[in-house]
Image (cartoon, rainbow, N blue to C red):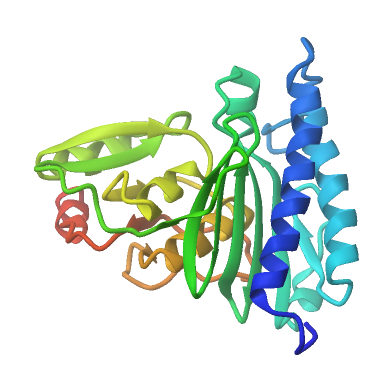
Amino acid sequence: MSKNVSYTALLEGVEEIAERAGEAINEVYQRADADVTYKDDKSPLTAADLASHEVLKAGLADLAPEIPTLSEEGKATGYEERRSWHRFWLVDPLDGTKEFIKRNGEFTVNVALVEDGVPVLGIVHAPTLGRTYGATCGGAWRRDGGGERCPIRASGTGAEALVVVASRSHAGPELTAFLEAMPEHSLRSMGSSLKLCLVAEGAADVYPRIGPTMEWDTGAAHAVVLGAGGRVLDLEGEPLAYNKENLLNPYFIVLGERPVPWREALAATK
């Protein structure tokens, strides 16, 4: 990245590109047929994923041609090449394809700038909800529709009982056991990377992800959590890292500022 290009300028550019990708998604979303196919791993793929990918690929190349891009829907880049990347774009053109197919609006466009394994800038745009989250290491915000950016903080809900956010489409027995070991709490379900953003804005206290995700699923929202003062940790308590040889994330927990006895709950499930 050129020394005279600030994170703020990049963030504004990424936000505009993500919104254009969201418009491409909504064009498909408004059609009766989502053109669903399936990848080799049985995960769904729609025309909207591909349309968004093309917008993001071209837009990011114009914005910062010197920064390589790793996208879920792009050509796979081997680790022998990636390992030398000090900085790269990490992109999920449509996170929450299952939510897109269910037509509940809980899907997002995710773009993160990763530097030395850490997401330092992120945009999470939910086109159907008209909601965007953005962050750099200097802070995080939420914007609804054409409104102003409102700063957010992972301050916790302040409710007497914890508020736990969990996946709408990926609940399993390990998560059930974890939740049973947690203290009194209410459960909020949400799709896509919006779950991390709920912790970032203080609408939830904790998000346990006891299930598989890929780096592009989390990078942008991880940046939002960090900008809002929260943490994303693996189950050993270490920060989630990016540009690994294997792009599969370990299980992880998203925490705001409120103390949560997640280690004790995890231990009780073993």
> What residue do we see at 73% from left, 22% from top?
29
Decide: is 114 above or below 174: below
Pick the front one: 199 or 244: 199
Q: How many marks?
A: 0
* Residue 138 screen position, x and y as percent: 49, 75
* Quarter-of-image position of residue 52: top right
> What residue do we see at 71% from left, 71% from top?
9
Decide: is 115 above or below 107: below
Q: Is residue 134 visible?
A: yes
Decide: is 70 above or below 83: above
Decide: is 39 above or below 203: above
- Give the residue furthest to the top: 32
> What residue do we see at 33% from left, 40% from top?
165
Left or right of residue 184: residue 23:
right
* Residue 23 screen position, x and y as percent: 77, 35
* Residue 133 screen position, x and y as percent: 54, 51
Left or right of residue 230: residue 248:
right
Left or right of residue 223: residue 254:
left
Q: Is residue 37 visible?
A: no
* Residue 95 screen position, x and y as percent: 63, 41
Left or right of residue 138: residue 238:
left
* Quarter-of-image position of residue 3: bottom right
Q: Where is the N terminus found, in terms of image quarters?
A: bottom right
